[in-house]
């Protein structure tokens, strides 16, 4: 009786292990299963005139920062100026370890020629692309990124106040305010870069405690 029971238990464990192996082999990681990497694979044109498939060529297996903008609103809300500070701090890592994509929300106004002129005038470094999708595709891409924002960051239209950052290879995404401290932005993105070995003491994840006297004013402006 005991032998039969042991045999049944052993078989049950084996089946469970087999099930887990099959799940690991054929199903995506949990974040991807919730839409982590289900991006529209729509064509977008860069300021250099090259056409990319958004997901397969720009997102898949890359660490990226993505934000939405339009050139006409830069005087009122200079999001590209804020991103330039982040790009400057990335230095040689930009285009190699991290890519930045600024997607226009007004493709009818922001032609490829106009984006190219802005890139030339502001000396945009390699690894930072100004992208022009169609009008409908801008909204589709934005709707996908909105899935990982907290409820209080949701609103109608395209959110131009957030920078989405993530690792397309594993489907992990987050966001922070576009005008947040650039060093904080780089710290967040560094969590997703490969080859990072923890050598210091463990640190608290998530927003910095409000009671900390040394907290930055932008430290809790992220999700």
Image: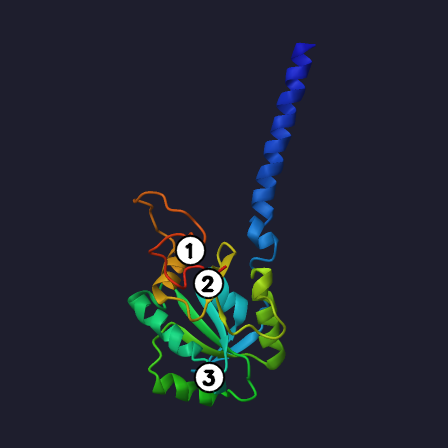
- Could you tell which of marks 2 and 3 lies nearer the N-terminus? 3
Q: Which residue is mark 2?
A: 221
- The image quadrant of residue 20 is top right
Q: From the viewer's perspective, is residue 98 above or below residue 34?
A: below
Residue 123 in the image: x percent, y percent? 33, 82
Checking the image for residue 192, the label placed there is 1
- The image quadrant of residue 147 is bottom right
Label pair 3/1, CB-CB below 8 angstroms: no
Residue 170 in the image: x percent, y percent? 50, 54
Q: How is the image coloured?
A: rainbow
Residue for point 40% across, 54% down = 191
- The image quadrant of residue 130 is bottom left
Q: Nearer the viewer, mark 3 or mark 1?
A: 3
User: In whole angstroms, how far apart are the C-alphas of marks 3 and 1?
Assistant: 32 Å
User: In whole angstroms, how far apart are the C-alphas of marks 1 and 2?
Assistant: 19 Å
Position of 154 with respect to 168 (left or right) is: right
Residue 120 in the image: x percent, y percent? 36, 86
Given residues 122 and 79, the one toward you in this image is: 79
Residue 216 in the image: x percent, y percent? 37, 61
Q: From the viewer's perspective, is residue 15 above or below residue 112?
A: above
Q: Is residue 47 visible?
A: yes
SS at badge 2:
loop
Position of 35 with respect to 58 (left or right) is: right
Label pair 1/2, CB-CB below 8 angstroms: no
* Disc 1: CA contacts within 10 A as few (<14), some (14-19) or many (>=20): many
Position of 77 with respect to 91 (left or right) is: right
Q: Quadrant of the N terminus?
A: top right
Q: Which residue is mark 3?
A: 76
């Amino acid at each position: 009786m005991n032998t039969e029971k042991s045999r049944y238990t052993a078989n049950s464990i084996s089946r469970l292990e087999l099930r887990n192996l099959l799940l690991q082999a054929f199903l995506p990681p949990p974040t991807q299963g919730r839409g982590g990497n289900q991006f529209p694979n729509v064509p977008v044109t860069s300021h250099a005139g090259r056409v990319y498939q958004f997901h397969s060529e720009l997102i898949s297996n890359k660490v990226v920062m993505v934000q939405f903008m339009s050139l006409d609103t830069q005087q009122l809300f200079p999001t590209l100026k804020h991103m330039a500070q982040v790009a400057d701090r990335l230095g040689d890592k930009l285009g190699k370890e991290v890519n930045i994509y600024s997607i226009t929300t007004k493709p009818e106004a922001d032609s490829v020629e106009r984006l190219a002129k802005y890139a030339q005038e502001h000396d945009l470094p390699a690894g930072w692309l100004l992208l022009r999708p169609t009008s409908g595709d801008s909204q589709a891409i934005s709707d996908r990124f909105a899935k990982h924002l907290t409820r209080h960051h949701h609103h109608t239209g395209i959110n131009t106040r957030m920078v989405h950052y993530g690792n397309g290879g594993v489907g992990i995404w987050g966001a922070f305010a576009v005008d947040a401290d650039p060093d904080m932005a780089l710290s967040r993105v560094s969590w997703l870069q490969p080859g990072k070995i923890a050598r210091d003491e463990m640190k608290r994840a998530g927003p910095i405690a409000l009671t900390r006297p040394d907290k930055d004013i932008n430290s809790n402006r992220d999700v």
